[in-house]
Image (cartoon, rainbow, N blue to C red):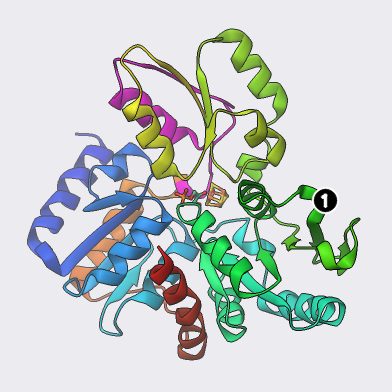
Amino acid sequence: MTTTEENTKRIFEIKKQLGEDMLILAHHYQRDEIIQFADAVGDSLKLAQIAEKNKRAKYIVFCGVHFMAETADILTEDWQKVLLPALDAGCPMADMADRAQAEICWDIITKEFGESIVPITYINSKAEVKAFVGLHDGTTVTSGNAKKVLSWGLGYKDRVLFLPDQNLGRNTAVELGIPVEHMALYDPHKQSLEYSCPKEDVKMILWDGFCCLHNDITTDHVEKARAAVPDAKVIVHPECRHEIVKISDGSGSTEYLIKAVKAGESGSKWVVGTESNLVERIKRENPDKSVYLLDPHSICKNMNKTNTANLLDTLEGILKGDFSKQIVVDRETAENSIKSLNTMLSLS
Ligand code: 13P
Ligand code: SF4
């Protein structure tokens, strides 16, 4: 037996032993070797909703990245422990904004626009940023509810500070009919705010952050895919740049991408622009269709850090009472960030 096979066998044994005391959640970008153990697989919205509703599991093992485990810790009860098997699995996009930077930005933009702004943070953000947003009566958002949540924000105040993903902010605002010229860009390093329209027309203040993987997808990838498979539909994640979304046939969360291909006719062809583990799985689950990965470099190193070795280590730790993989958000941060998460969940 290989080490992976031994680990797999032991993980299934511990899963059986712990029963409903343990809940294993996995994001769609996880490797197949991890997906097989998951009690639920989903996009960020679905996993946050499942974590919030579960009042049975003492241990929630989050196979994903750090901000997802933090979110689960905020949404669950104090007696529920959230564990992250790969403690170094961060999200470079979430790391593009911290609370201190958000406070400086707020000073600058409220000097410019007064009290007319509500902050909205992508769920791919640090808990301290969610807390900042909660303190300013804002909300979190995910790619699965972005239109609804942004509509709420623009109904509540004249303009929205959207952080840290400028692409999701821009793409969603365009879907709601806001011209790109009415969007400002805030650079947290230069502490600069740029816009080219009259001040009163600015509806969105986009934080200059992005997901490296999705931001690296170019129009060249789309053009090459269209030339290679002319009758395919190109669908992409909204973390892609606007010029990509504009020339694609559809965009949405990982859950949307899965459903779109599943609903396609037998024999249909699809080019999917998102993380490769998911696209390979969509391919296998739709043998009657042709599915292609838009950019072969779409690999999230952090999502790939969870493996059978660190998952097994986490589970053996639970049996021994070793919770060194636990993610704990401090009380003050949790209390403020839950406001922003609850607003989002009530809108979803
Ligand atoms: P969703 O699964 O919510 O679409 O998010 C994609 C992603 O990049 C998670 O980090
Ligand atoms: Fe972060 Fe992008 Fe990886 Fe998602 S795919 S965890 S946004 S780096």
Q: Nearer the viewer, residue 312 or 72?
A: 72
Residue shown at 35% from the left, 11% from the top:
267
- View extreme (bottom): residue: 332
Asked if residue 171 lies left or right of residue 23, the reply is right
**Viewer-proximal residue among 158 and 134:** 158
Q: In percent of the image, x 55 and y 28: which residue is there? A: 249
On screen, residue 339 above or below 26? below
Q: Is residue 291 magenta?
A: yes
**Compared to 93, does 253 lie above or below?**
above
Indicate whether residue 157 is drawn in magenta: no
Please, is residue 77 above or below residue 188 in the view?
Answer: below
Q: Nearer the viewer, residue 300 or 179?
A: 179
Position of residue 278 measured from the top left corner of the image (x, y, whole percent): 41, 36
Residue that appears at 71% across and 22% down: 220
Instruction: Identify residue for label 1.
Output: 181
The image shows residue 256 at horizontal and vertical percentages of 42, 41
In the picture, measured across the screen, residue 292 lies left or right of residue 296, that is left
Residue at disc 1, secondary structure: helix
Q: Position of residue 110 (x, y in %)?
A: 80, 80
Q: Quadrant of the C terminus?
A: bottom left
Instruction: From the viewer's side, name the closer residue of 10 and 59.
Output: 59
* Mark 1 surroundings: few (<14), some (14-19) or many (≥20) residues within 10 A: some
Where residue 138 sits, quadrant-wise, is bottom right
Q: Is residue 217 visible?
A: no
Stretch of the chain drawn in magenta: 274-303
Q: Amino acid at mark 1?
A: Glu
